[in-house]
Amino acid sequence: MIRYSRQRIDEADIAAVVAVLQGDWLTTGPAVDAFEAALCELTGAAFAVAFANGTAALHGAAAAAGLGPGDVVATSPLSFVASANCARYVGATPTFVDIDPATLNLDVAAVPVGLDALVAVHYAGLPVDLARLAHRPRIVIEDAAHAIGALTPDGPVGNCAHSDLCCFSFHPVKPITTGEGGAVTTNDAELAARLRRFRNHGIVPTPEAGGWSYEVVDTGYNYRLTDLQAALGTSQLAKLEAFTIDRNRAAARYRELLADDPIVLPPLAGEGWRNAHHLFAVRVEDRRRIYEGLHAAGIGAQVHYVPIHHHPLMAPYGPFDLPQTDRAYEQLLSLPLYPGLTAADQDRVIDVLRSLW
Ligand SMILES: *Cc1c(COP(=O)(O)O)cnc(C)c1O
């Protein structure tokens, strides 16, 4: 099976994890500190806080931002459910801004006035143009689960040039992996302190009352990343640039070879932007037949995503009128794309696709 995405692990990654196993710390310790420092260096953000997964990172961002009951939090309906659930987790109300079909991202011109927060999803790895939001909510959170390695004219995604907090996922299908993992970057020291408390039970050490002493000052969780995972993350991060170049190379090859096929290719990144290309999401007619034909031939194409507002969980917040997302969902299909995908694999994907037109 050629999957739509997968991790790329080498001997250096394996050695990094084994070295942690031979040391004194297995869970959050020096390897997490090193991973967070590497994330700051890559993104240019002042602070990075590692989390157990990307969903926990989004939950942490919503909590640290002080969102709660009565707040309205919009996101893109063309995303994974976690992009909206982070609002629900803190008691806020999720809503949606329809996509711009030219970018497949939420339409920055359609962001309404009066939102408390926006969770901006960089779909497939193409950054949302946050400098051009029609109305800037009190809080802007980036869901950059697809987009570590992406660039904007204002620098790397994760530098929070136009946001308060930026969340990453390190699930194995994402641009780099820690098995399960996530992180939040920010330039605000108070937000960073809240994120650290949130991932560790709301605990604040109080050494003045004794070396053992601590206080629990707000609701927190055990959302810590382990040192085992963080060591893998730092090792992976060293290869992110090569991975991103490889994903973009494979994407360019699909574009060239599929230029004359009956297919809508993914949006191109503009001058000064770089797509991290977590996904290569094309639009096809008769998507179900194409999906099933590819799977029957061992090609694990995928659909990103069942729109969030289609899930029964979201019914109490609707109804929603999101025609661009509904239309795109009928046609979207993610073709296999990952670092190390060979030209022969790509040719096979294209041959099977052509047999299905
Ligand atoms: C993967 C993903 C998440 C959740 O990340 P996990 O690490 O799987 O919890 C959130 N948002 C988007 C857009 C994602 O693709």
Image: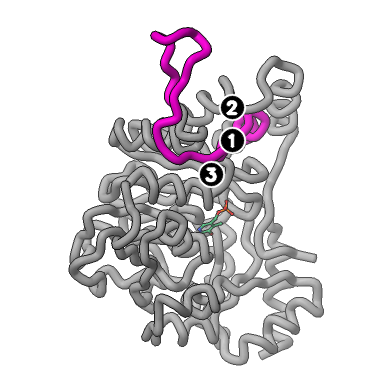
Percent across and percent down for residue 334 are 60, 71
- Foreground: disc 2 or disc 3: 2
Dots 1 and 2: beta carbons under 8 Å? yes
Q: Which residue is mark 3?
A: 182
**The label number, if any, that marks residue 28 in the structure image:** 2
Residue 260 seen: no
Query: Viewer-proximal residue, 222 or 99?
Result: 222
| Distance from mark 3 CB to nearest ligand 1 atom below 8 Å | yes
Q: Amino acid at mark 1?
A: Leu
Crowd around label 1: few <14 · some 14–19 · many ≥20 (10 Å): many
Is the residue 134 above or below the residue 8 in the image? below
Dots 3 and 1: beta carbons under 8 Å? yes
Is the residue 224 above or below the residue 166 in the image? above
Q: Earlier in the sequence, mark 3 or mark 1?
A: 3
Q: Which residue is mark 1?
A: 225
Percent across and percent down for residue 319 are 40, 84
Q: Does 217 lie within the magenta span?
A: yes
Quadrant of res 133 = bottom left
Stretch in magenta: 204-233
